[in-house]
Structure formats: C-alpha cells, structure tokens
Amino acid sequence: MTGDRSRERRQVTVRGVVQGVGFRPFVYTLAEELGLTGWVTNNADGVVAEVEGPGRAVADFCTRIGSEPPPLAVVESVEHRAVPVQSGDHGFTIRPSAGGPGRTLVSPDTATCDDCLRELADPADRRHRHPFITCTHCGPRFTVVTSLPYDRDRTTMAGFPMCADCRREYTAPGDRRFHAQPIACPICGPRLTLRRGTADTAPRQDAAALAEARGLLAQGAVLAVKGLGGYHLACDASDPTAVRTLRKRKNRGDKPFAVLADSLETVERLAQVGEAERELLLGPRKPVVLLRRHRSAPTADVAPGVAPGSPDLGVMLPYTPLHRLLLGLPGDPPGPTVLVMTSGNRAGEPIVTDDTEALTRLDGLADAWLMHDRPIHVPCDDSVVRICAGAELPVRRSRGYAPFPVALPVPVVPALAVGGDLKNTFCAGDDRYAWMSAHVGDMDDLATLTAFERATAHLTDLTSVSPRMLIADRHPGYRSTQWARRAAETSGLPLRQVQHHHAHVASAMAEHGLDGSAPVIGIAFDGTGYGDDGAVWGGEVLIADYDGYRRFAHLAYVPLPGGDAAVRNPYRMALSHLRAAALPWSDDLPCTAVATPGERKLLDRQLERDLACVPTSSMGRLFDAVSSLAGVCHRVEYEAQAAMELENAALSDVTGSVGDDARNDAYRFILRTETEDPAAPLIADPAPVLAAAVADIRAGAPAGPVARRFHQGVIALVQEVCEVARHRTGIETVALSGGVFCNALLTQGCCDVLERDGFTVLRHRRVPANDGGLALGQLIVAARAEE
C-alpha cells in the first residue's frame, strides 16, 4: 500500500454458501487488517459489502474476499463495481441483514468442529457438556432455517432469547460465534428431556436425561434420539438381543443397519479404512460411509445381526454434540462404543421430526425418548456414501450435502423435477443451478407424499425458484408422476415427462459438466424403468445427449412373472431366465429346490401362457436371478438384497480378481441382432452365462466363484458393447448410471477396463447413481433454456 494515496470505494457482492458460515466477521477482519472503512450485510443475494480506502488496499480486499473465505464458505462468484467515495465512514461496521428478492445458497448442516468439541470436554468452559454447542464453523443450518436472509429470527432458534453472555459473543466481530445463528449455552439454549412414553409424568432433564439415556443403552434398551434432521432409533450394536429387538420392532428384515462409532480407532477395528474413507469419516459432513468389512473374525463391537449378508458396514462418527455425549467423554461411566443408529420411522414412512408425533409414531419401537425442544424445520436423513475407483460414490445425498446445489453446464428455465418413486429426491432448477432435495424416501404411503409436498414448497421458497414447468418420469403408475400431473392441472404449468434411463444417463453427463453438444455411450443398468415399448427396461445401452437417445443395445427380454412377486422372490426370476435360456428346472439347482412342486407347476403354466408376465430387460433382475441360481438369496426383504449378497459372495472368492482382466475366466454374454435392420439395437443374450453357471454349480462350485465369474461377465459385456459402439459411432465417452452401479465391485471393474481401452468414463460422484439422482437428469433434459 506504500505510496498509494488515491482513495476508492467499491461495492462487492459475494454469492455462494456465504451465510451462516462466519463470512461477515471474516469480511470485517479483512477490512480492519487492510485499514478500510465501510460496511457489510447479508441480503437475499448473498453478502454485500462496501469498502473505501487506498486503491491498492481496496483491490487486495476484492481479491482476498474470494480466495481466503472461512472454512465452511463456498464462494461461487465475486462481483465488484466502483461507487462514489463518501469519506464519512467511521471504521468498518456490520449492518443488519436486508430482505428483498434474490438468491443465496444455504449451508448444509455441518458436524461439530474441533474447537467446539474441545470446549464440550473442558470442565472450565461454560459450555462444558452442552448438547447444543455450536459456532460459525459448525452445527445446524439447513434443517433450522425457515426463510432468507439467514438470521436467527428466520430459524427455529427464534424462540430462544440469548442470555447476556451469548449476546456478547454474538455481537463481537472477533469472536468465533459472531452471528452464529444457532448460538446457545446451558442458560439460554434448548433443553434435553428423557421420557419413557406419553404417560411419563416425571421426565428427566438435561444431565439427568443424558445419564439415564446412556444407562438405558448399556442395559439393552432401544432409544429414540432426536438429531439434526429427525429422530434416530439407537441401541448397543454389540448386544445381539438389542439388535434383534430393534430389527423385529421395526420390521426391518435383514436390511443392514448403520452404526455410530465413538472413534476412528474403533472404526478401524470394524472395517477397512483407506485415506479417502478417513477423510470422509473425519470431515465436516460426516456421512455414513460404506466400508468393506474385515474378513477376519468378527469384532465384539458389532453383533452379526447388524448387517447380515452385506459386504459392507455403514459407519459414521459423531456429528452432533449430543451424539458425542451419548458415546461418552473421558471420565464418563463405561458404555457402548458403537451404537446402531437407524432412521426413526416405521418401515416405509418418512423420518419423524415432531416431538409429539415421535411419542405416538415410534410407540412400540422405542423404550424411551431422548428429545429436545429445538424444532426441526426440514427433515433430513443421514447421507450414505462410499469410495469407489478412488472417489466418492453417493448412495444417498442428504445431511451435510443438501441443499448445496449442483452447477449446471447449460442454463435451465425455472422448473421442478420430481424424480422417481424409490429413493425419491426431487430437484429445483433455475439458470445454471440445480438444488437437489434431501432424501425423501419411497413414495408408497400418504405420510411420505405429505412430506414430499412440504419439502417441495420449502425448497422452492428457499431457492426463490418459481417453477414454470414440472417434470416427471414417464411411468404412468409412479406416485411422483401422478403428483406432478395433479399439480400441473391445478397450477396450469406444463408437464414434461422424461424416459427413466435417459434421465439416468443425463444426470451423469450433467454432474460432469457436459454441455450436451456431443453424445455419450450411456450404460444404464437398474432394476426397473418404464420403456418406450411398455416393457420393463433396465439393461440399457443408449447413444444419448440431452436432446434425445437411441437404444443401441439392451439385455434380452425375459418374462417378469407376477411383477412385484418376481422382485420379492429372486428364485422366480432365476426360473424365468432358465426357461428363456432353454435350461431345465432340475432339482439339483438351488433356485429350483427352494420352490415347492406346486409353485413350480403354477409358474410353469404362467410362463407358458404368458399370464401377468411383462417382458423385462432389467440387469438388476438378472443379478437377482444369478443370486438365487447360486444359492445366495432366494427371497428378499429389502431392495437390492439379492444383488448385495451376490457381491458379498464374489468378494469372498479368492481364486480370482474381478477387475484385473474382465475377459479372463468370465461368463460370456452373446451380442446378437434380431433383425436385418442395421439401426436395430443389439441384444445381449445371457443364455451362455446361465448355462456356464449351471455347469459350475453341478460341478460342485460354491457360490463365491459363480458370483465372481458373473461379475466378470457383466464387466466384459460392458467392455465389448462399448467397443462395438465406438467402432460404429466414434464416441469415446461412456456414462455409467443406474442403481446397479452402486455395486462397487462392478463399477471399479468397468472403470478399469474402459479407461485401459482409452474411453473417458463418467461415473457418479456428486449425485447417486440410483434413482436418488434421477431428478437432475430429468431437469436438464426437459428444462434447458435457449442461450
């Protein structure tokens, strides 16, 4: 600044995740450091500041405001313009927030920071053991904000007046809690309460509530615990009886539970933890991370019933102070080191957020309720991710991620895309942003539909998106599509419908920033999607851009006998595939043996007469069929169970590696055509795969080698069909999407062989490959604007 005496004044607007993350105190400190006068405020666009001083200092400010933001901030843009010098400012001030139209990005909820954790454990600190400790670097955001700009009176903390000490911290620009909207302490903050049901007339509070909750968990009880975005059901993960009780009460079947561990050291006893997994576990989002379980003897920390049949264990570390306190601080009485932590709801219902509802809807599931009086405005389940091919693969994108937007490679008109019916996530979009909602769930009951409707209203209000179009899947039976149709009729908005697998491929293209000017080879493998011919698609290879697609290849059609009955009973799919491959239903095959003679007779007649047998090309159903054929899983209690257990069986086989060479030892599909038309799609016939698997099983091969060779076969199919597509079209970019690609073994193997063959491979890293990412693809296909 030496020698620069000219004065300038500039107005600076910063957009992005810049509210509720300590941005204004950062601006204040930066201006003070540079000797600038002026002011800063929040408004509906983001953060706006005016700074005045020597020209070089003002220029330095405009650079550093974008390059040195606070830890939780994400700066999307910095704009500045010259304004008249005023010379009347006295120092630098922080002004109250201003309302008005505009748009900013709300921060996701963030795990408790290290500074707050140190204070939580410090007996000398006034927030020692305070279950709601937070600062500008951590804590609730999305789940408590009711409107913008993000200020305390626009959050669910509005009903908790600050005490004098908290007010002093809140108004001190140099304090870590300056304008931390959820700021609180034991004097003025929310209160813990433990109840043993609606009839409990003497609930315990605060420290007594926490102590009793820890005691109950140690005794084998099931506890309903209010978290950031809803209630969890918790029990001691090491107690087989407690785990079995929770599973029975929740009617969970064998679906794996996620667990909350007290430390990274405990996690490393449970599963394999690489550097990328360690960063996720310890980072500010702290999702549930799917980790490969150790093949050694099971640890005493987790009972076998926590995740039976799964190759993975879903693990997270404490992300709220209450979780940390439940697992204990140094000096606390011994208690469980690992807790089962599953969504607080009954099967098929949305997560419970309201305290009164929790006492009724979770009655019969929980033995006691650990609740607090800070309202949850937005339901938000835990996110689930895994590391695959060295990068994140989201399985469920929710807490810690929502509502942070996905930047779009092309602009879209204001629109709402409603996603699918399973793992529903919807998407609001405008210009070059798409805001994905938190996980809603399966749209199969009224409570979920009601939650969906509330969530769409909140997200569009929060993002200032006024939809001019509604977008849905083409499946006429989807509840999400039916909702969109009713909403379109009521509002007069146009409704666009997008083919399911086209949306899958488009979502992968969009998150990788492709503008759609060049097509890709889209591999869309899933369980169910409504096809153009009315069949159930799911083993699709599309040549696609955002404007459209053509079906280049697909898995051969086989009958889906009884629709959902075949999905629930993989042995039915196995018998259907055997029939289509002209292979007999001999009694020495596990899938035949599990069916009673009466069942076989009825199924034989059903297939022969084509009764209630919709044709399907689903790769997901082929995984089910091979799982039953190999004797791994014949009946399922949750989505993708048979495929997950087949992946686990493949991992257990040490006789070969899936990804080293997909052609080595692989079962082989045949690529054929059914017509002379060169434009007709290729057919991937699994008959040779099934014949080879049957031969192996009859030769006494266990499930592991059969599962491994099948995975190799699917990888080899992807490799071969992409080679043919490249030869015919010249396209060298492949997009992998659909729920089957949540299988890390398959995804890793496909990435390895395709990249080795010179393809550019797009796989999901920001939105799920399953239907949780569907809405993003719907949006960019249907709502692209003319530039």
Image (spheres, helix red, strand yellow):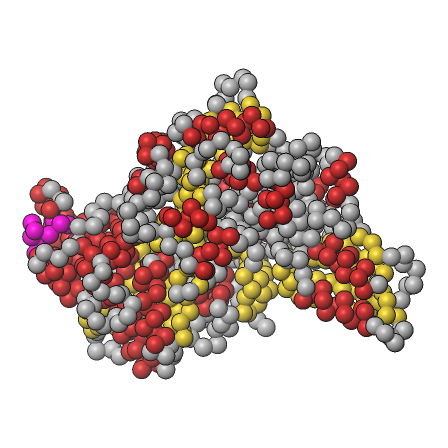
Query: In which quadrant of the rendered image does the C terminus lie?
Result: bottom right
Q: Is residue 155 visible?
A: no
x and y, in percent, of residue 9 in the image: 84, 67
Rendering quarter of residue 727: bottom left
Q: Does the stretch in magenta take in 551? A: no
In the image, residue 654 lies at what x, y percent?
Answer: 22, 60
* Residue 670 image-quadrant placement: bottom left
Q: Residue at x 66, y 53 (%)?
A: 21
Residue at the image point whose x is 35% and y is 65% from the top? 748
On screen, residue 211 versus residue 712, left or right, reads right
List x then y, in percent, for residue 459: 58, 50
Is residue 590 inside the magenta stretch? yes
Identify which residue, 193 or 48, lies in the foreground.
193
Q: Position of residue 147 (x, y in %)?
A: 66, 46
> Which residue is rendered at x = 84% and y = 63% of the image?
35
Residue at the spot x=28%, y=60% of the render? 619
- Judge from the rendering whether residue 641 lies leftward or rightward of residue 664; answer left or right: right
Locate the N terminus by quadrant: bottom right
